[in-house]
Image (spheres, rainbow, N blue to C red):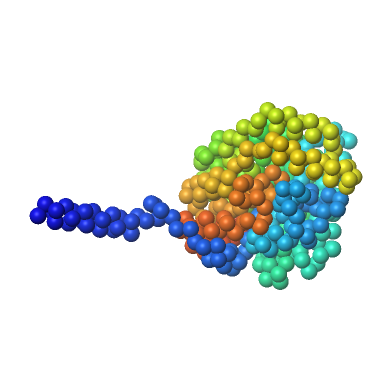
Amino acid sequence: MMRDRSFRQAKLTLISLSLGMLAFGPALAKTMPSERAARALHERILTLDTHLDTPAVVARPGFDILKHNDWKTAFAQVDVPRMKAGGLDGGFWVIYTAQGPRTPEGLNAARDAGLMRAVVIREMLARSPKVFGLALKADDAAKIAAEGKRVVFMSIENSYPLAKDVSLLETFYKLGVRMVGPVHFATNDWADSSTDKAEWGGLSPLGKQLVAEANRLGMILDQSHASDQVLDQMLELSSAPIIASHSGCKAIYDHPRNLDDDRLKALAAKGGVIQMNAFGAYLKPLPQSPERRAALAKLAAAYPNLASRSQAEQEAFRQARVRLDAAFPENRATFDDFMAHLLHAIRLIGVDHVGIGIDWDGGGGVVGLEDASKVWKITQALMAEGYSEEDIAKIWGGNVLRVMREVEAKAQK
């Protein structure tokens, strides 16, 4: 009798546990969909990344974006074969200019560099019209993707090339630019940087003019790299929603480049979107060995002004960097670290206000998400979390296009 009672008790316990798993299964254990299922859903939706620093790579002598490149040796994370392999339809291709002297000579050089980087993007389009399509309005993206082409929106990271002349923004608009961020690592004439000493308490007087001009033209305003005060003022001054094209969550890692929960909520309340980056140093603390730091400093000193050097010199630098990485491996963030930021933002402000901006070819990419060929894994992870195809489509492109349509509508008025 005692044995029967023990058996019945064990059976009841198992039934209770089974019912608990049915009721609370997703919270207890997630089921990862197959790669086949994830890729099938991924291919059905429009996938846009809002921060592709790839034009800097396209400008390198000898680089061919139509051929497959190895990210470990070519130091390039995006090319057409890998975009196809990963199911990345396109995104915002960046005109990036490193901050330099705020002198007349420095401003003129920055203006010329920015214009020439815009030319690099336009030449890429002109050389391969069957591969790439220039998108000037939100509705262009789906049409270009339906033709089997990669979508090319253009954006400005760091308004240094505007050379303190707000009217130059219209020149870049006519070249195809549809997104602009005022600042990068260093505070400039437009705004305070999140990673530099504050000079303006947010936007400068010129920066406030930049907000108004971007609204007038119909250009998305990008907060990434700007200080928290810049975000606050952009939200107050802009007549249209804004985005953070490649940022993270301060609640997960307290880094100046990341946004705190209150500001994420404020961004969402004004219709904006945070596009999640995969720049390892913004995802978690990543201390590097003293030997690696010293070797990197020595290599940088040996190849100053690398972008202006010959193809042979750039190749020599890449080979030296491959040897350095083998000798002193980098401490890197992982795919799970990236997903922690992405999921926090989604749970906090909802699927309508979160997107993807990995920062490819600008330092982004983590273990498990090394280049554009792996982006389908984000879809797989979101499916495992229980998000629907409609949710995932918003995160992968729908949200930024919704912001763009609102920006366009405000400009027309």
Kindly tell me whether residue 165 is visible in this rendering.
Answer: no
Q: Is residue 258 above or below residue 274?
A: above
Relative image position of residue 273 (x, y in whole percent): 58, 51
**Residue shown at 65%/47% (left/top)?**
365
**Residue shown at 28%/54% (left/top)?**
17
Residue 373 falls left or right of residue 26: right
Relative image position of residue 317 (x, y in whole percent): 82, 41
User: Which is nearer the eye, 397 or 30?
Assistant: 30
Please state, as top left, top right, bottom left or bottom right, where the N terminus lies in the image: bottom left
Please state, as top left, top right, bottom left or bottom right, where the C terminus lies in the image: bottom right
**Residue shown at 79%/40% (left/top)?**
320
Quadrant for residue 129, please give it. Answer: bottom right
**Residue shown at 86%/53% (left/top)?**
62
Relative image position of residue 402 (x, y in whole percent): 60, 59
**Extreme residue toward the left, this view:** 1
Kindly tell me whether residue 153 is visible in this rendering.
Answer: yes
User: Which is nearer the eye, 172 or 301?
Assistant: 301
Relative image position of residue 409 (x, y in whole percent): 65, 60
Q: Is residue 102 above or below residue 239?
A: above
Residue 44 falls left or right of residue 18: right
Count all numbered tags in the image, as a single digit: 0
